[in-house]
Image (cartoon, grey):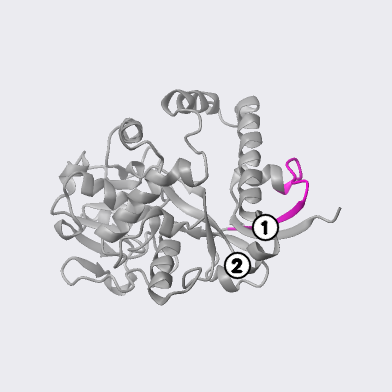
Amino acid sequence: MTRHRVRLAIRDWDFLTPIVVGDVRSPDLEVTIERLDALVADPAHHPNCDGAEVSFSRYARERVQGIAQGTAHGTGGLVGLPHFLMRAFRHRCIITAKASSITGIAGLAGKTIGLEGWPDSGHIWTRALLRREGIGVGDVHWRVGRLTAADPIRPHAGDFGWPGRIEVLPNDKPTLGLLETGEIDAVFAPFMPPGFHEAGSRLRALLPDYRAAEVAYFRDVGYVPGIHVLALKPEAVAARPGLGQALSELIDESTRVWLAKRAKYAETTPWMIDELARSTRDLPSGWDRNGFAANEAMIDAFAEEIFAQRVTQRRLSPRELFPG
């Protein structure tokens, strides 16, 4: 039987390794993965893929625009799946100077915070943590710019500028430099900068025990925030009924196989086995389950945040985001 060929453009996540090396295969899909360092700029028109990893925020914003314009798949022209290729807690992503006296999120009220792209999914979830403490977007001075001098310069604020509140840093100044000189009080970091964990670092996580805060957050809300989703071109979906579900199940199986190998070959780092054990204790089985039903509460919370933070002009329901 001829296997249906599908090409995906996805970040080089470790959990995809079993698919890439052929340990996990679909009986009727031939899946090729283009491994990326960054997300595809325009996945709907990428010539070499049928689907891609997409920012949850970008997908949601395009769905809002598409519904307003009456288009079937949003202005981005993609069919989004409630399969979250990237999930992450955000408490750990708030960093400050080691000498700072601020040790809690509530202490950020009225302060100046640096961050990269304003509408980025991760930053939306991080600002949601501030909103849980009663700190709205207008209660902070936001400075938007690249994290380090080595990061690319890009349009960070877009149409979300707010004089006196949300401002782009002049001369492409890196936010980390301003943090170290005390010109800003904290930074939202998408990934920890080089050297952050070294003993001599002048930076630290804002929360002394961010892991405990993340566990408490999970027990309160019941999910790990979704950052990126898998999205397919409409023509790929039309050519193979059930493609989205088949791909989601394949990636889930790849993840299961990868995690089983991590547990068996835990000596890749001295304490990997301890981390796996702690995660098992702190999170219930199925915490990373994909699909609409398993993620409806998280999808709804994200829809609320992007509306409340003025990233979108309309509050979508989970079913409007993922019609099914």
Residue at image location 47% in from the left, 69% down from the top: 74
Q: Nearer the viewer, residue 202 or 110?
A: 110
Instruction: Establish if 213 lies above or below 27.
Output: above
The mark lying in front, picked from 1 and 2, is: 1
Q: Quadrant of residue 100?
A: top left
Q: Which residues are magenta?
A: 20-36
Q: Which residue matches tag 2?
A: 234
Residue 272, horizontal then vertical, whole percent: 54, 28
Look at mark 1 in the image and give the residue it sits on: 241
Q: Relative to 5, is 71 on the left or the right?
A: left
Q: Looking at the picture, how far across and down is residue 263, in whole percent?
A: 61, 27
Give the answer, above or below, for where 126 lies relative to 209: below
Q: Name the image quarter holding residue 47.
A: bottom right
The amino acid sitting under disc 2 is: Pro
* Mark 1 crowd level (few <14, some 14–19, many ≥20, 10 Å Cα): few
Q: Is residue 139 left or right of residue 65?
A: left
Magenta stretch holds residue 22: yes
Within-10-Å neighbours for mark 2: few <14, some 14–19, many 20+: some
Above or below residue 36? Residue 209 is above
- For residue 17: magenta? no
The circle drawn on residue 213 is: none
Horizontal relation, residue 172 to residue 254: left or right? left
Q: Which numbered disc flags the more N-terminal residue, 1 or 2? A: 2
Q: Residue furthest bottom?
A: 69
Q: Give the residue at x 33% y 37%.
A: 221
Residue ID at (23%, 48%):
130
| Residue 174 in the image: above or below residue 189 | below
Observer able to see residue 54: yes
